């Protein structure tokens, strides 16, 4: 099955009943020319380097289902998700999407469909039982969403997605791999072919 748009991914996750996992990843690019008016847009606030950012959606096993086009890296994760994911989740099927702290607040915008790490309600002088409970909840959420990092790592095996040396305008084309050509799916298909 080939999923060509984010709407198809949300429909697929809703029909299969599996949770999705979303995360953003940065891809380094060449520095824009001096004097270009939007030169600062490509500087990542996280890594302090020139990059573009792509939003990756995987299933619960870490198989890459969709990669977004790559806007400049100054775009925050939550802003990137609000461009299309929020409307699809609010109007679409009941889907659970796991996300990291960069997507805090999307749960309220999507009717609780985006699940982020728990907020820390007591910040100063928290009792020991609260610290233990918060740490347990945080680790449980992290262990459920770690598979998206595996999917991103497989994408970064492609040199063009680890550091893109071509033109930034062409970055959106290679950042949309089909599920059939992703390393996770290819190895899984080869294994199932050997078993048959």
Image (tube, rainbow, N blue to C red):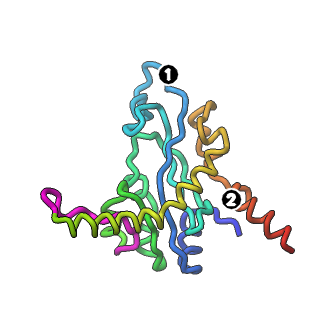
Q: Nearer the viewer, residue 52 or 188?
A: 188
> Element at badge 2?
helix
Pick the quarter of the image with the C terminus. Answer: bottom right
Q: Residue at x 42, y 36 (%)?
A: 47
x then y, percent, for residue 171: 59, 40
User: Which label sits on residue 33?
Assistant: 1
Give above or below for 12 relative to 143.
Answer: below
In front here: 11 or 152? 152
Q: Is residue 12 left or right of residue 182?
A: left
Residue at x-position 44% and y-position 66%: 98
* 123 in the magenta segment: yes
Q: Position of residue 133 (x, y in %)?
A: 28, 69
Pointers 2 and 1 in contact (CB under 8 A)?
no
Confirm whether the magenta stretch covers residue 36.
no
- Quadrant containing the N terminus is bottom right
The residue depicted at 50 percent of the width and 64 percent of the height is: 21
Numbered tag placed on residue 184 in the rendering: 2
> Which badge, 2 or 1, comes first in the chain's sequence?
1
């Amino acid at each position: 099955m080939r999923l060509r748009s984010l709407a198809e991914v949300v429909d697929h996750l809703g029909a299969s009943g599996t949770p999705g996992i979303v995360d953003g990843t940065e891809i380094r690019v060449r520095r824009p020319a001096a004097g270009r008016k939007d030169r600062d847009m490509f500087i990542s606030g996280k890594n302090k380097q020139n990059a573009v950012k792509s939003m990756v959606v995987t299933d619960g096993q870490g198989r890459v289902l969709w990669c977004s086009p790559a806007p400049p890296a100054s775009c925050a994760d939550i802003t990137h998700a609000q461009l299309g994911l929020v409307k699809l989740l609010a109007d679409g099927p009941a889907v659970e999407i796991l996300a990291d702290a960069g997507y805090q607040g999307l749960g309220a915008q999507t009717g609780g469909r985006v699940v982020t790490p728990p907020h820390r309600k007591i910040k100063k002088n928290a009792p020991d039982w609260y610290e233990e409970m918060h740490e347990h909840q945080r680790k449980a959420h992290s262990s459920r969403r770690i598979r998206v990092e595996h999917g991103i790592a497989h994408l970064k095996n492609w040199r063009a997605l680890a550091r893109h040396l071509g033109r930034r305008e062409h970055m959106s084309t290679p950042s949309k791999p089909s599920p059939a050509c992703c390393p996770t799916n290819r190895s899984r298909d080869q294994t199932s072919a050997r078993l048959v």
